[in-house]
Amino acid sequence: MNQIPYAVVKLARDSQRPTGLDYIQNIFADFIELHGDRRYADDPAIVGGLARLQDRYVTVIAMEKGHTAKQRSCRNFGAPHPEGYRKALRLMKQAEKFGRPVICFVDTSGASCGIGAEERGQGQAIAENLMELSTLCVPVISILIGEGGSGGALALAVADRVWMLSNAVYSVISPEGCASILWKDSKKAEEAAACLKLTAGDALRLGIIERILPETELGEKPFYDRIRRALAEELEALEKDPDLVPKRYDRFRRIGQVKERT
């Protein structure tokens, strides 16, 4: 898959791409949204609740950006606050209690980095999600549907299976942020994107994801039907695996390992 990285970044950021709520509404039935982290507030940048996937009940959690300028402002442009991550973790622990699989849709340029978010423990909230997700005793599947930015994305992506849409991106930092740090010039974002190895093809080659989902008929019924079937098939296999937690641990421990040449 030969892709121009920064062109893929632009596609991943397109306001007309399906958002988390679009996936929830078109893939699942009987969705009941649950609100709040039981500590501070409800965060509209993360939507989550109970739903039915074919004949299986699941917990579904999605980062939501919105499409219009008003929607994006309301959703904080998909940049979750600490209460969003705590809400997501509350729903994941609830899913574990009742034996429901967890499905996450990831789409964020990064966690909110405002003063309020830092005062309310943004770093701790993300770290707690990483720790708790690594030991969750139910199947977890995460799909990157647009941007996957840094720890803000990883907080919902410590999963048994991580998939990406073909024009999604996954990176430790945005190309603009990387260029500003390395060259003190955000206009070199295109060059930075090429260095970051952030496309779905790169992630698959590096063992960061298991599957690339093609965007044929993106946003149309056949597109959502394919994802629904893929999720149902994968969950059926994962639910039969008695070693989910150690395999999930091993999966992430393998990332970044380097073999020395002999």
Image: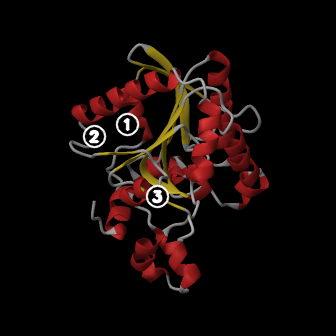
- Residue 173's x, y, as percent? 55, 66
Mark 3 to mark 1: distance in Å?
29 Å
Q: Are marks 1 and 2 in contact (CB under 8 Å)?
A: yes
Residue under numbered circle 3: 206
Classify 10 Å Cα crowding around label 1: few (below 14), some (14-19), many (20 and above): some
Of the pair 195 and 59, the residue shown nearer to us: 195
Residue at the (68%, 27%) spot, across then down: 93
**Is residue 80 shown to the viewer in this render?**
no
- Tag 1 or tag 3, which sits nearer the N-term? 1
Q: Answer whether labels 2 and 3 touch (C-beta < 8 Å).
A: no
Mark 3 is surrounded, within 10 Å at the Cα level, by few (under 14), some (14 to 19) or many (20 or more) other residues, namely some
In the displayed structure, 38 sits above or below 258; it is above
Crowd rating for badge 2 (residues with CA inside 10 Å; few <14, some 14–19, many 20+): some
Q: Earlier in the sequence, mark 1 or mark 2?
A: 1
State the residue at coordinates (26%, 36%).
223
Tag shown at residue 219? 2
- Residue extending farthest to the top is 55
Point out the frontmost of discs 3 and 1: 3
Q: Which residue is mark 1?
A: 22
Q: Amino acid at mark 3?
A: Leu
Q: Position of residue 91 (x, y in %)?
A: 63, 29
Is 42 drawn above or below residue 171 in the view shown? Answer: above
Question: Could you tell me the amino acid type at mark 1?
Answer: Asp
Is label 1 in a helix, a strand or a loop?
A: helix
